[in-house]
Image (spheres, rainbow, N blue to C red):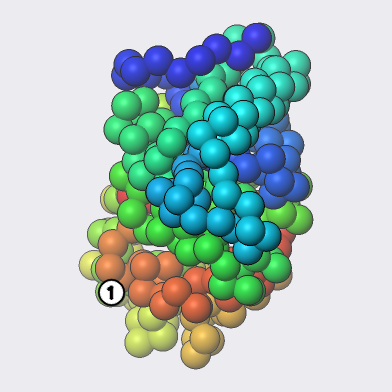
Amino acid sequence: MATRLKEKKITMKTLLIPVDFSGISENVLKYIVGFATDTKVEHVILLKSFYVSVYAELLPSADFVQLSAGDIRDERQGAELALTALANKLSKKLSPLVKITTAISGLPILRAVYQVVDQESPNIVLLGSDKTVLENDSYMAEQIIAIAKTSAVPVMIVPECARYEKIELALVPCDFAVISQLEALYGIHDRKKWLHPRLMVLNTNPKLKNSESDSHIAAGLAELLAGYDYKVYHTEDKDTVKGILHFADKHNTQMIIALPGKYSFFYNLTHRNITNALALNATRPVLILK
């Protein structure tokens, strides 16, 4: 049975999942059934933003319908019932040991996520993406990108067409001019019994394509990836994103891991390029580290 969210810190392994009752949210929940089992998740938080702007209360809609306080209250109650039903449905598919809580927020989705992250310290925020939504450059696409770039904790974006596969092989694109960014992988290391896949470390800097002969880079990789089974690859594709996605498809990786910092391929992309990249990546999640 799902429980309501309380304002206290959670130290267990926790996933935060914003939902909107769409097919995208439904696919994320299907994905986490397998993910939560393999990573021994202990707590899942389902968050629904029920934000009503002051304009919605004061001005009529395009259909000349003005929302009353009663209308807004009824919609919120309906959302609460739907969220509880969703949590109860999920609880039947997960281990009884997994705690499921729900939260309804009156804040816009971005602020609502920030608030729950601050209160509950989840390990990962999971978001669903839809190719059509992203290609249309919609409001939801903007929110996905804003959350991914500014969240204080790692964010996993799960494409609508993605089906869960045990994460045994992950692609890590990295500019070898700044390999220190690889230290972010400590956050998913097996010492926390979290993710621990084999890594395909893809150098995206063509100027360093012969880095195997550079003892400094080789030593840095060995130190930063201690405990990981990894292999180094290189791409000279002028379109970094297409090169990464092509490599991931060719090697059938189950996840792409984006490193943090200004040199990360993800953070350097423009809004348009990010939407294009996420839209083209239809089969595997992207984990954005912090």
Residue 93 in sight in this render: yes
Residue ID at (43%, 36%): 106
Q: Name the spot of residue 244 as percent of width and height, x first.
A: 56, 73
Residue 71, compared with residue 149, is above or below; it is: above
From the viewer's side, name the closer residue of 95 and 193. 95
Label 1 Cα neighbours within 10 Å, binned few <14 / some 14-19 / many ≥20: some
Compared to residue 77, the image places residue 181 above or below, namely below
The answer to whether residue 97 is above or below residue 47 is above
Task: Say whether residue 253 is left or right of residue 137.
Answer: right
Q: Is residue 44 visible?
A: no
Task: Describe residue 187's horizontal placement relative to residue 138 as left or right.
Answer: left
To which quarter of the image does residue 116 belong? top left
Q: Nearer the viewer, residue 150 or 283?
A: 150
Q: Identify the residue under disc 1.
A: 177
Residue drawn at (68%, 36%) of the image:
29
- Three-letter code, disc 1: Ala
Q: Residue at x 41, y 48 (%)?
A: 54
**Percent position (x, y) of residue 35?**
64, 34
**Residue 140, position in %: x, y?**
55, 59
Quadrant into which the N terminus falls: top right
Q: Which is more toward the observer, 141 or 243?
A: 141
Q: Name which residue lies at 40% across and 15% down.
A: 6
Q: 181 left or right of 105?
A: left
| Secondary element at image label 1 | helix
Determine which quarter of the picture holds residue 226.
Answer: top left
Number of numbered tags placed on the structure image: 1
Task: Identify whether 99 is placed above or below 145.
Answer: above
Which residue in the rendered view is the most extreme toward the bottom?
A: 238
Would residue 132 appear left or right of 170 to someone viewing this image? right
